Amino acid sequence: MSLPSCPQCQSEYTYEDGEMLVCPECAHEWYAGEAVAEEALEVKDANGAVLADGDTVVLVKDLKVKGSSSVIKQGTKVKGIRLQEGSHNIGCKIDGFGAMNLKSEFVKKA
């Protein structure tokens, strides 16, 4: 039997826990018979443009990296962003720094 992918992060590694389905990657839990409501997550950049998964953005401000003395410079291009819930609503990988979460107010659509 094939289980459905996670409705939140699209992970294929879901498993059953009683009546619930659980995603081990994002910890999302939902009922197996529950209809998936597609909620459009709307994230806007510093200029008010709507962002989408996979977009390329450019930083509009120098950002200090928490727990490090490094700084990500203004104008750094970030490719293939992922939108997510929370205050740091952009997940991405930045060359030379690795995976991080950014606030949409510090980027503009490229």
Image (spheres, rainbow, N blue to C red):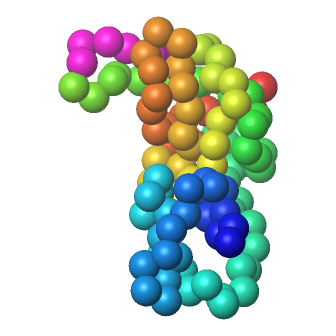
Query: Eyeballing the image, is 4 above or below 33?
Result: above
Q: Nearer the viewer, residue 85 or 99?
A: 99
Q: Is 3 left, or right, of 98 in this rendering?
A: right
**Where does residue 90 sit, x and y in percent of width and height?**
56, 43
Which residue is found at the position 66% from the left and 90% from the top?
33
The quadrant the N terminus occupies is bottom right
Query: Eyeballing the image, is 71 above or below 30?
Result: above
Q: From this viewpoint, is residue 7 visible?
A: no
**Where does residue 65 sit, x and y in percent of width and height?**
33, 23
Q: Is 12 left, or right, of 70 in this rendering?
A: right
Was residue 69 drawn as part of the magenta stretch in this picture? yes
Picture quadrant of residue 14: bottom right
**Where does residue 2 sit, x and y in percent of width and height?**
69, 67
Q: From this viewpoint, is residue 29 visible?
A: yes
Picture quadrant of residue 57: top right
Which residue is found at the position 54% from the left and 26% from the top?
93
Start and end of the magenta stretch? 68-73
Was residue 77 drawn as part of the magenta stretch in this picture? no
